Amino acid sequence: SGANGDEGEGGASVGDNMLALRSFAYYEVRKYNWWSSRQHSSVERDRVFLSRRMALLYLAKRNSEELLAQGIAAGKSWEALSTGRTGPYALKPDRVWDESFLELADAILEEYGPNCKSAIDVLKPPSGTTFMLVEHRVETTDADELLKLLATPCASGIET
């Protein structure tokens, strides 16, 4: 029997589960566009993923490709863009996105995408696009809490 004596399905007391909330996360990749040397900009949702890994892979690819494009526009090779970037700003692996990135650990991807964005920022291009990751947590109501809510009269002011 539960602490308050009323058992729910599976032996768990309704009281124990009354406030139990489950949560999940989804991952939004936002696109930051700027023009006129950043005098004008916009931020918009680009993609939403249910997996952090999928979002990290997408972010790494998009920022890597944008860094390469900005480098070409500035007349710089990938090597010139990445040389001297050490410590927390280093591009590891030091190459443009390719399919081998699918095998990289999440910890590496978590740094690579934002570090490509940082390298773009250093170039100070007059216009461009970068991508950033935003995690959203959603709290959900479980079945026990729903049953409790359904059993509770609503305060509608109408007498029955």
Image (tube, rainbow, N blue to C red):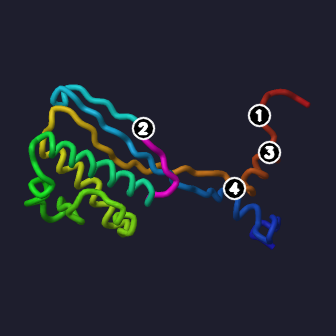
Q: Amino acid at mark 2?
A: Arg
Q: Which residues are magenta?
A: 45-52
Name the residue located 20 percent from the left edge and 50 percent from the top edge.
Answer: 118
| Image mark for residue 45 | 2
- Is 143 on the left or on the right of 133, as rendered? right
What is the quadrant of the C terminus in the image?
Answer: top right
Tell me the element at label 2. strand
The answer to which of marks 3 and 4 sits earlier in the sequence is: 4
Q: Report crowding for label 2: few under 14, some 14 to 19, many 20 or more residues within 10 A (C-alpha).
A: few
Query: Label 1 vs label 3: CA separation?
Result: 9 Å
Q: Name the residue carrying label 1.
A: 155
Q: Nearer the viewer, residue 142 or 109?
A: 109
Residue receiving disc 4: 142
Q: Is residue 83 magenta?
A: no
Circle 1 SS class: loop
Q: Nearer the viewer, mark 2 or mark 3?
A: 2
Front-most of residues 16 and 85: 85
Q: Which mark is residue 152?
A: 3
